[in-house]
Amino acid sequence: MAQQRPGRQQDGQQDGEFEERVVAINRSSKVVKGGRNFHFSALIVVGDRNGRVGVGFGKANEVADAIRKGGELARRAVITIPLKGQTLPHAVRAGYRGGEVIMRPASEGTGIIAGGGMRAVLELGGVRDVLAKSLGSKNPINVVKATMAGIAKLRTKDQVLQKRDISSFQSFTTLS
């Protein structure tokens, strides 16, 4: 049997752990000799509500096919959110094209203070307490992609210390 790459699934294997949410559906039309041809695009967010979330943008001639394609693309693009308890480890500001978002950690019990596409990404990602604001574009595609860019910027304390290679500086702190 062929060796499988980590994180990938074999054909026919069902992934029932992810919850799927449709954030936006767009209809575009093309005028042709016989009338209009309609095409649909769907922005889908999937997540396990436990620190993993992905976004997909599917396009097809039918709404159901666009949603299915978006879900498949989202499952392939899943990233892990580094959480600190039930909130974010630090404040982050990120943008994608015209959309810009600010996300800040919140105390326990605050809930998700965010709107639209940001709320879907944060809820399905497992963040339970966060203060978030969308600036600039109100286009859900840009807002969701800016939110994902912000999540990609997040680092835990351990990740930062490891990148700085603090173990080599331990001798300086013990001397003082």
Image (spheres, grey):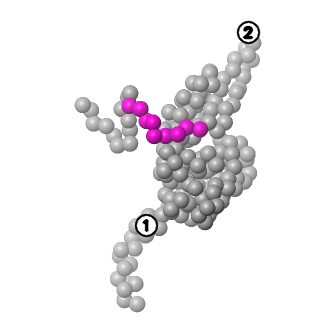
Q: Is residue 19 magenta?
A: yes
Residue under label 2: 34
Q: Label 1 is placed on what type of residue? A: Asp
At 52% from the left and 48% from the top, the residue drawn is 49
* Res 30 label: none
Residue in the foreground of this view, choosing between 143 and 111: 111
Q: Label 2 is placed on what type of residue? A: Gly
Q: Position of residue 122 (x, y in %)?
A: 59, 50
Query: Which span is picked out in magenta?
Result: 13-21
Q: Position of residue 158 (x, y in %)?
A: 43, 66
Q: Is residue 93 visible?
A: no
The quadrant of the image that shows the N terminus is top left
Q: Would you place residue 68 above or below residue 36 in this image? A: below
Q: Is residue 13 visible?
A: yes
Residue in the foreground of this view, choosing between 2 and 47: 47
Residue under label 1: 158
